Amino acid sequence: MDRINYNGRVAIVTGAGQGIGRMYALELGRRGAKVVVNDLGVSRDGSGMDTSAADKVVEEIVAAGGQAVANYDSVATMAGGENIVKTAMDAYGRVDILINNAGILRDKSFLKMTEEEWDLVISVHLKGAFCVTQPAVKVMKKNNYGRIIFTASTSGLYGNFGQTNYGAAKLGLVGIMNTLKLEVSKYNIKINTIAPNAWSRMTADVFPPQFEDKMNPQFNEPMVLYLCSEENTATGHVYTMGAGWYGRTAIVSGEGLCIGDAKRPIAVEEIRDNFDKISDMSNTKEQESGLGMLSYMAPLLNG
Ligand code: NAI
Protein backbone atom coordinates (compact mmCIF):
# COMPACT_ATOMS: atom_id res chain seq x y z
CA MET A 1 0.00 0.00 0.00
CA ASP A 2 1.20 3.54 -0.79
CA ARG A 3 2.31 5.07 2.44
CA ILE A 4 0.66 8.39 3.24
CA ASN A 5 3.20 11.01 4.25
CA TYR A 6 3.20 14.65 5.28
CA ASN A 7 6.64 15.57 3.96
CA GLY A 8 6.96 19.34 3.67
CA ARG A 9 3.72 19.90 5.59
CA VAL A 10 3.47 21.89 8.81
CA ALA A 11 0.89 20.77 11.35
CA ILE A 12 -0.47 22.40 14.49
CA VAL A 13 -2.06 20.11 17.05
CA THR A 14 -3.67 21.86 20.01
CA GLY A 15 -3.82 20.09 23.35
CA ALA A 16 -1.20 17.65 22.08
CA GLY A 17 0.57 17.15 25.42
CA GLN A 18 -1.31 13.96 26.21
CA GLY A 19 -4.35 11.85 25.38
CA ILE A 20 -5.63 11.77 21.82
CA GLY A 21 -3.77 14.90 20.68
CA ARG A 22 -0.43 13.36 21.57
CA MET A 23 -1.20 10.45 19.23
CA TYR A 24 -1.83 12.80 16.30
CA ALA A 25 1.37 14.74 16.96
CA LEU A 26 3.57 11.64 17.25
CA GLU A 27 2.26 10.03 14.07
CA LEU A 28 2.41 13.28 12.07
CA GLY A 29 6.04 13.60 13.21
CA ARG A 30 6.79 9.98 12.23
CA ARG A 31 5.28 10.58 8.80
CA GLY A 32 7.34 13.65 7.95
CA ALA A 33 5.28 16.64 9.12
CA LYS A 34 6.87 19.46 11.08
CA VAL A 35 4.69 19.67 14.16
CA VAL A 36 3.73 22.48 16.53
CA VAL A 37 2.84 20.72 19.77
CA ASN A 38 0.54 23.13 21.59
CA ASP A 39 -0.44 22.45 25.18
CA LEU A 40 -1.13 24.69 28.12
CA GLY A 41 -0.61 21.73 30.44
CA VAL A 42 -3.75 22.21 32.49
CA SER A 43 -5.64 19.74 34.65
CA ARG A 44 -8.84 18.15 33.39
CA ASP A 45 -10.93 21.11 34.61
CA GLY A 46 -8.65 23.68 32.98
CA SER A 47 -6.82 24.83 36.11
CA GLY A 48 -3.04 25.16 36.51
CA MET A 49 -0.37 25.21 33.82
CA ASP A 50 2.60 22.98 33.03
CA THR A 51 4.87 23.50 30.03
CA SER A 52 6.41 20.03 30.40
CA ALA A 53 3.37 18.38 28.74
CA ALA A 54 4.17 19.89 25.33
CA ASP A 55 7.94 19.61 25.87
CA LYS A 56 7.77 15.85 26.46
CA VAL A 57 5.87 15.23 23.22
CA VAL A 58 8.34 17.39 21.30
CA GLU A 59 11.17 15.32 22.79
CA GLU A 60 9.43 12.10 21.73
CA ILE A 61 8.98 13.33 18.15
CA VAL A 62 12.57 14.52 17.89
CA ALA A 63 13.89 11.28 19.45
CA ALA A 64 12.05 9.36 16.73
CA GLY A 65 13.81 11.45 14.06
CA GLY A 66 11.02 13.98 13.47
CA GLN A 67 10.77 17.77 13.75
CA ALA A 68 8.64 19.59 16.33
CA VAL A 69 8.43 22.74 18.42
CA ALA A 70 6.42 23.38 21.57
CA ASN A 71 3.90 26.13 22.20
CA TYR A 72 2.27 26.78 25.58
CA ASP A 73 -0.43 29.33 24.69
CA SER A 74 -4.06 28.90 25.59
CA VAL A 75 -6.34 28.37 22.60
CA ALA A 76 -9.01 30.35 24.42
CA THR A 77 -7.83 33.85 23.50
CA MET A 78 -7.17 35.45 20.13
CA ALA A 79 -3.68 36.46 21.33
CA GLY A 80 -3.03 32.81 22.18
CA GLY A 81 -4.38 31.55 18.85
CA GLU A 82 -2.30 34.07 16.91
CA ASN A 83 0.83 33.10 18.82
CA ILE A 84 0.24 29.39 18.16
CA VAL A 85 0.14 30.14 14.42
CA LYS A 86 3.13 32.51 14.77
CA THR A 87 5.09 29.67 16.40
CA ALA A 88 4.54 27.61 13.24
CA MET A 89 5.40 30.52 10.95
CA ASP A 90 8.56 31.45 12.87
CA ALA A 91 9.82 27.86 13.02
CA TYR A 92 8.69 26.47 9.67
CA GLY A 93 7.21 29.32 7.57
CA ARG A 94 3.77 27.81 6.83
CA VAL A 95 0.70 26.04 8.22
CA ASP A 96 -0.93 23.21 6.27
CA ILE A 97 -2.74 21.21 8.93
CA LEU A 98 -4.61 22.35 12.03
CA ILE A 99 -6.08 19.85 14.47
CA ASN A 100 -8.24 21.67 17.04
CA ASN A 101 -8.12 19.16 19.88
CA ALA A 102 -7.52 21.01 23.19
CA GLY A 103 -10.28 20.54 25.70
CA ILE A 104 -11.41 20.64 29.32
CA LEU A 105 -14.44 19.53 31.30
CA ARG A 106 -16.55 21.30 33.94
CA ASP A 107 -19.43 18.88 34.31
CA LYS A 108 -22.48 19.86 36.36
CA SER A 109 -26.17 19.22 35.92
CA PHE A 110 -27.88 22.17 34.22
CA LEU A 111 -29.61 23.61 37.28
CA LYS A 112 -26.37 23.60 39.28
CA MET A 113 -24.10 24.95 36.56
CA THR A 114 -22.43 28.28 37.30
CA GLU A 115 -21.77 31.04 34.81
CA GLU A 116 -18.03 30.45 35.26
CA GLU A 117 -18.34 26.73 34.44
CA TRP A 118 -20.37 27.60 31.36
CA ASP A 119 -17.99 30.32 30.14
CA LEU A 120 -14.78 28.33 30.69
CA VAL A 121 -15.91 25.34 28.69
CA ILE A 122 -17.36 27.44 25.88
CA SER A 123 -14.20 29.54 25.73
CA VAL A 124 -11.77 26.60 25.39
CA HIS A 125 -13.75 24.46 22.96
CA LEU A 126 -15.82 26.90 20.91
CA LYS A 127 -14.06 30.24 21.11
CA GLY A 128 -10.73 28.38 21.11
CA ALA A 129 -11.53 26.88 17.72
CA PHE A 130 -12.26 30.37 16.37
CA CYS A 131 -9.12 31.88 17.92
CA VAL A 132 -6.72 29.32 16.42
CA THR A 133 -8.51 28.60 13.17
CA GLN A 134 -8.92 32.20 11.99
CA PRO A 135 -5.18 33.03 11.96
CA ALA A 136 -4.43 29.58 10.51
CA VAL A 137 -6.94 30.03 7.67
CA LYS A 138 -5.34 33.37 6.77
CA VAL A 139 -2.08 31.49 6.09
CA MET A 140 -3.76 28.52 4.40
CA LYS A 141 -5.68 30.82 2.05
CA LYS A 142 -2.42 32.38 0.83
CA ASN A 143 -0.96 28.91 0.19
CA ASN A 144 -4.18 27.61 -1.40
CA TYR A 145 -3.99 24.52 0.82
CA GLY A 146 -5.30 23.49 4.21
CA ARG A 147 -6.66 20.60 6.23
CA ILE A 148 -8.57 21.45 9.43
CA ILE A 149 -10.11 19.24 12.09
CA PHE A 150 -12.59 20.29 14.76
CA THR A 151 -13.08 17.96 17.70
CA ALA A 152 -16.73 17.56 18.64
CA SER A 153 -18.22 14.86 20.85
CA THR A 154 -21.21 12.56 20.93
CA SER A 155 -22.14 14.66 23.99
CA GLY A 156 -22.90 17.49 21.60
CA LEU A 157 -24.28 15.37 18.78
CA TYR A 158 -26.62 13.37 21.03
CA GLY A 159 -26.29 14.53 24.66
CA ASN A 160 -24.68 13.34 27.87
CA PHE A 161 -25.84 13.92 31.43
CA GLY A 162 -24.10 16.85 33.15
CA GLN A 163 -22.58 18.29 29.97
CA THR A 164 -24.85 21.07 28.69
CA ASN A 165 -21.87 23.46 28.54
CA TYR A 166 -19.57 20.93 26.84
CA GLY A 167 -22.29 19.62 24.53
CA ALA A 168 -23.24 23.13 23.41
CA ALA A 169 -19.61 23.97 22.67
CA LYS A 170 -19.04 20.69 20.84
CA LEU A 171 -22.09 20.96 18.60
CA GLY A 172 -21.19 24.61 18.03
CA LEU A 173 -18.05 23.37 16.29
CA VAL A 174 -20.21 21.58 13.73
CA GLY A 175 -21.88 24.96 13.20
CA ILE A 176 -18.53 26.67 12.58
CA MET A 177 -17.53 23.94 10.14
CA ASN A 178 -20.80 24.04 8.20
CA THR A 179 -20.28 27.68 7.27
CA LEU A 180 -16.48 27.83 7.14
CA LYS A 181 -16.36 24.94 4.64
CA LEU A 182 -18.40 27.11 2.24
CA GLU A 183 -16.28 30.20 2.81
CA VAL A 184 -12.93 28.50 2.16
CA SER A 185 -13.78 25.77 -0.35
CA LYS A 186 -12.23 27.68 -3.25
CA TYR A 187 -8.85 27.73 -1.47
CA ASN A 188 -8.48 23.93 -1.31
CA ILE A 189 -9.09 23.96 2.44
CA LYS A 190 -10.93 20.85 3.68
CA ILE A 191 -12.57 20.99 7.10
CA ASN A 192 -13.98 18.01 8.94
CA THR A 193 -15.20 17.37 12.47
CA ILE A 194 -14.62 14.26 14.52
CA ALA A 195 -16.34 12.84 17.57
CA PRO A 196 -13.64 10.64 19.11
CA ASN A 197 -13.97 8.07 21.85
CA ALA A 198 -10.91 7.12 23.87
CA TRP A 199 -9.77 6.19 27.31
CA SER A 200 -8.03 9.29 28.68
CA ARG A 201 -8.08 11.26 31.92
CA MET A 202 -11.14 12.98 30.45
CA THR A 203 -13.14 9.75 30.27
CA ALA A 204 -11.51 7.56 32.94
CA ASP A 205 -14.63 7.92 35.10
CA VAL A 206 -17.08 7.74 32.18
CA PHE A 207 -16.30 4.45 30.41
CA PRO A 208 -16.35 1.10 32.27
CA PRO A 209 -12.81 0.14 33.46
CA GLN A 210 -12.68 -2.98 31.26
CA PHE A 211 -12.68 -0.68 28.18
CA GLU A 212 -9.38 0.95 29.16
CA ASP A 213 -7.15 -1.13 26.85
CA LYS A 214 -9.65 -1.36 24.01
CA MET A 215 -10.42 2.35 23.84
CA ASN A 216 -6.83 3.26 23.14
CA PRO A 217 -6.51 6.91 21.98
CA GLN A 218 -4.40 5.63 19.06
CA PHE A 219 -7.51 4.30 17.30
CA ASN A 220 -8.68 7.88 16.64
CA GLU A 221 -5.41 8.87 15.02
CA PRO A 222 -5.53 7.14 11.60
CA MET A 223 -8.93 8.63 10.71
CA VAL A 224 -7.82 12.12 11.63
CA LEU A 225 -4.51 11.75 9.82
CA TYR A 226 -6.31 10.54 6.70
CA LEU A 227 -8.62 13.59 6.83
CA CYS A 228 -5.48 15.75 7.12
CA SER A 229 -3.77 14.14 4.13
CA GLU A 230 -3.49 15.55 0.61
CA GLU A 231 -5.48 12.56 -0.63
CA ASN A 232 -8.57 13.50 1.35
CA THR A 233 -11.17 15.43 -0.60
CA ALA A 234 -14.02 15.14 1.94
CA THR A 235 -15.07 18.39 3.58
CA GLY A 236 -17.88 19.37 5.92
CA HIS A 237 -18.31 15.86 7.29
CA VAL A 238 -18.58 14.57 10.85
CA TYR A 239 -16.91 11.24 11.68
CA THR A 240 -17.50 9.34 14.90
CA MET A 241 -15.07 6.66 16.07
CA GLY A 242 -13.69 4.57 18.89
CA ALA A 243 -11.92 1.24 19.54
CA GLY A 244 -11.42 0.72 15.79
CA TRP A 245 -14.99 1.55 14.67
CA TYR A 246 -15.34 4.46 12.23
CA GLY A 247 -18.52 5.93 10.77
CA ARG A 248 -20.04 9.13 9.46
CA THR A 249 -22.62 11.10 11.42
CA ALA A 250 -24.74 13.68 9.63
CA ILE A 251 -27.50 16.20 10.19
CA VAL A 252 -30.35 15.12 7.95
CA SER A 253 -33.87 16.34 7.36
CA GLY A 254 -37.02 14.33 6.89
CA GLU A 255 -39.13 14.82 3.81
CA GLY A 256 -41.76 16.68 5.84
CA LEU A 257 -45.05 17.88 4.52
CA CYS A 258 -46.31 20.99 2.76
CA ILE A 259 -49.52 22.29 4.28
CA GLY A 260 -51.71 25.08 2.86
CA ASP A 261 -50.79 27.30 -0.08
CA ALA A 262 -48.34 29.85 1.41
CA LYS A 263 -51.25 32.30 1.51
CA ARG A 264 -53.82 31.10 4.04
CA PRO A 265 -52.87 30.85 7.75
CA ILE A 266 -52.17 27.36 9.11
CA ALA A 267 -53.88 26.16 12.28
CA VAL A 268 -52.32 24.39 15.26
CA GLU A 269 -54.73 21.49 14.64
CA GLU A 270 -53.27 20.94 11.17
CA ILE A 271 -49.88 20.41 12.80
CA ARG A 272 -51.44 18.02 15.35
CA ASP A 273 -53.28 16.06 12.67
CA ASN A 274 -50.14 15.75 10.50
CA PHE A 275 -47.60 15.41 13.28
CA ASP A 276 -46.59 11.82 12.35
CA LYS A 277 -45.93 12.79 8.73
CA ILE A 278 -44.02 15.91 9.78
CA SER A 279 -41.91 13.83 12.20
CA ASP A 280 -41.32 10.95 9.78
CA MET A 281 -37.62 10.24 9.17
CA SER A 282 -37.94 7.32 6.76
CA ASN A 283 -36.74 9.41 3.81
CA THR A 284 -33.94 11.71 4.88
CA LYS A 285 -31.53 14.01 3.06
CA GLU A 286 -28.46 16.10 3.83
CA GLN A 287 -28.05 19.68 2.61
CA GLU A 288 -24.93 21.38 1.29
CA SER A 289 -26.01 24.62 2.98
CA GLY A 290 -28.95 25.99 4.92
CA LEU A 291 -30.49 27.37 1.73
CA GLY A 292 -30.97 23.77 0.56
CA MET A 293 -33.95 23.53 2.87
CA LEU A 294 -35.86 25.86 0.52
CA SER A 295 -36.18 22.91 -1.89
CA TYR A 296 -38.67 21.28 0.50
CA MET A 297 -40.81 24.41 0.36
CA ALA A 298 -40.60 24.66 -3.43
CA PRO A 299 -44.19 23.53 -4.12
CA LEU A 300 -45.39 26.35 -1.87
CA LEU A 301 -42.83 28.97 -2.88
CA ASN A 302 -43.24 28.36 -6.62
CA GLY A 303 -46.96 27.69 -6.53
P1 NAI B 1 -7.01 15.15 27.64
O1 NAI B 1 -7.51 15.83 28.85
O2 NAI B 1 -6.20 13.91 27.79
O3 NAI B 1 -6.17 16.17 26.72
C1 NAI B 1 -6.60 17.48 26.49
C2 NAI B 1 -5.37 18.37 26.42
O4 NAI B 1 -5.79 19.70 26.13
C3 NAI B 1 -4.61 18.43 27.75
O5 NAI B 1 -3.25 18.07 27.54
C4 NAI B 1 -4.75 19.89 28.20
O6 NAI B 1 -3.62 20.39 28.87
C5 NAI B 1 -4.98 20.60 26.86
N1 NAI B 1 -5.68 21.88 27.03
C6 NAI B 1 -6.78 22.13 27.78
N2 NAI B 1 -7.12 23.42 27.71
C7 NAI B 1 -6.23 24.01 26.87
C8 NAI B 1 -6.09 25.33 26.37
N3 NAI B 1 -6.92 26.31 26.74
N4 NAI B 1 -5.08 25.59 25.51
C9 NAI B 1 -4.22 24.60 25.12
N5 NAI B 1 -4.31 23.33 25.58
C10 NAI B 1 -5.30 23.04 26.45
O7 NAI B 1 -8.31 14.84 26.73
P2 NAI B 1 -8.56 13.84 25.50
O8 NAI B 1 -9.44 12.77 25.96
O9 NAI B 1 -7.30 13.53 24.82
O10 NAI B 1 -9.46 14.79 24.56
C11 NAI B 1 -9.00 15.44 23.41
C12 NAI B 1 -10.17 16.12 22.73
O11 NAI B 1 -11.13 15.13 22.35
C13 NAI B 1 -10.91 17.13 23.61
O12 NAI B 1 -11.34 18.21 22.81
C14 NAI B 1 -12.10 16.35 24.10
O13 NAI B 1 -13.16 17.19 24.47
C15 NAI B 1 -12.39 15.50 22.89
N6 NAI B 1 -13.16 14.29 23.17
C16 NAI B 1 -12.60 13.26 23.85
C17 NAI B 1 -13.34 12.12 24.08
C18 NAI B 1 -12.75 10.93 24.73
O14 NAI B 1 -13.43 9.86 24.73
N7 NAI B 1 -11.56 11.00 25.30
C19 NAI B 1 -14.76 12.02 23.67
C20 NAI B 1 -15.23 13.14 22.92
C21 NAI B 1 -14.45 14.24 22.70
Image: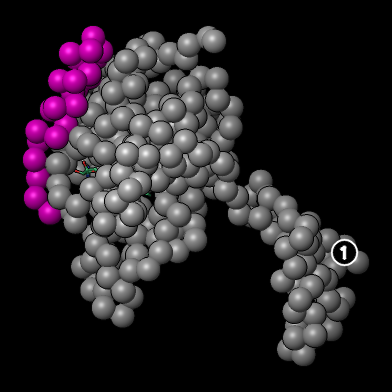
Label 1 packing within 10 angstroms: few (<14), some (14-19), many (20+) = few
Q: Quadrant of ligand 1?
A: top left
Q: Position of residue 10 (x, y in %)?
A: 34, 20
Residue 162 picture quarter? bottom left
At 22% from the left and 18% from the top, the residue drawn is 61
**Image height of 301 relative to 94, above or below:** below
Q: Position of residue 1 (x, y in %)?
A: 54, 10
128 sits left or right of 79 in the view: right
Helix, strand or loop under label 1: helix
Residue bearing mark 1: 299
At 73% from the left and 89% from the top, the residue drawn is 268
**Image height of 207 relative to 221, above or below:** below
Nearest to the observer: residue 240 or residue 295: 240
* Amino acid marked by disc 1: Pro
**Residue 291 shows up from this direction:** no
Instruction: Work out which residue is located at the far front of the displayed protein and give it.
Output: 210
Instruction: Work out which residue is located at the far right of the displayed protein and give it.
Output: 303
Q: Position of residue 295 (x, y in %)?
A: 78, 56
Nearest to the observer: residue 169 or residue 135: 169
What stretch of residues is rendered in magenta? 47-69
228 sits left or right of 181 in the view: left
Q: Is residue 37 one of those drawn in magenta?
A: no
At 27% from the left and 45% from the top, the residue drawn is 200
116 sits left or right of 206 in the view: left
At 44% from the left and 20% from the top, the residue drawn is 143
